[in-house]
Structure formats: C-alpha cells, structure tokens
Image (cartoon, rainbow, N blue to C red):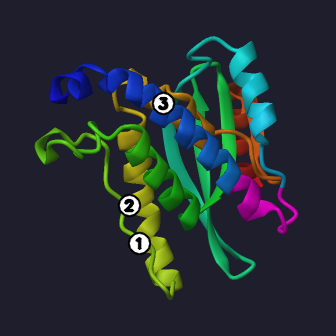
Amino acid sequence: NQEAGISSTIDHQDYYQNSAQYQYQNQFQNQFQNSGINPITSSTLEEIVEEQPEYPHEVIAVSIEKLYLMNDEYWYNIICKLSTNIVRSLWRCYKDFFNFQKLLLEAYPAEAGEFNKKNRIIPFIPGPVVTVTENLATQRLEVLEKYLNELIKLPDHISKSTLVISLFDMTQENDKQFTTEEYIQLFSSNSNS
C-alpha cells in the first residue's frame, strides 16, 4: 500500500488544498466576525473560483509598507502587484500569516518536508508569542516581507493556487485596489504633499 500512497500524492494534495481553502476561509470569517471587518465568504470564494480561470492572476511583487497598532493588535500593510495591472493595499495581522502557514503546510505536505525534510521548499515563519512589543512587531515586518517574497516565487502549483491567492484577496474593510497607474499617481501626489 505504500506504492499507492506514493502514486496518489497528487490526488491527496488536491484534497488537502480544498480542505485548507475551506478552513482558511472559515478561520477568516470567525476571526473578523465581531470586528466590523468583512471577510470574503466561502460562497463568494466558490463563485470567484468558478468564474475565473485556474490562475486568474498571480502576485508578481510584494512588500510590507507600514505597521499599525489597532485594537491591541499589530497590523501590517501589504502592497502587492498583480499580473493584471492591479496594485492592492491589504491589511493583515500576524496570526493571519501564521494560520495561513499552517494551512499551507497541510495543503502541501511534500513541499512542507513532511515526507523528507530535505525536500522542504515552503518558507518558514516564527510561531506566535504571548506578548508582542512594538520592537518585535517591527522585526516581524522584515521577516514577513521575506516570507511573502519567497512564497510568490514557489512553483506555480503553490504560488498560483487559490489558497495562496486568497491571502492577497480583498478581505478587510480597509483593503484597497488600484490600477498601477492610479497607485503611482496616488503615491506621487502623497509624497509631494
């Protein structure tokens, strides 16, 4: 039966990915249910997936621009450029990254090094801590930016997966989307003010 387990790894990855996507969306919905932030719902995600091609877009560049303390939690402002000439300004807290990482490892066990640690290609992020200071949150900014840049450079079956793309979806009330030209114009006008 070990041979069957090896030959059906790809089928299991599809199962894990679908399971992880569902868990990720439910985790987002539960997390922001009482915060006034509107997450994408699993039914909305299903509609998006049905309407779009397998790889509707890819994230081609990402950086973390700012860090804010809001409701006793540090939030990171992610700027990502999509292959569709769109720039998004997104807000995520550290537990979003950590919970996403757990789902990613579950969705891609071979790439996570579960079967052979030497084959791990999914980047690492540190686990959560009880007390987060501004200094720690600032240090995490660099770690998370490196993590996101490594994530988008993974092979297509991971970097263009619905799970990874969902991390860069518009899920927060303060998330914004611009064309590249609008973003450049906005950035230029803000820096001249």
- What number of labels is visible? 3
Query: Which residue is most to the front?
Result: 1
Residue 125: where, in percent of width, then height? 36, 60
Residue toward you, 189 or 146: 146
Residue 152: where, in percent of width, then height? 42, 35
Residue position for label 3: 15
Q: What amino acid is at disc 2?
A: Val
Quadrant where the N terminus is found in the figure? top left
Residue 43's disc is: none
Query: Which residue is most to the left?
Result: 118
Judge whether residue 64 is colored magenta: no
Disc 1 + disc 2, Cβ < 8 Å: yes
- Viewer-nearest of discs 3 and 2: 3
Residue position for label 2: 143
Residue position for label 1: 139
The quadrant where residue 157 appears: top left
Residue 89: where, in percent of width, then height? 68, 46
Whole-angstrom CA distance, mark 3 to mark 1, is: 35 Å
Residue toward you, 151 or 86: 151
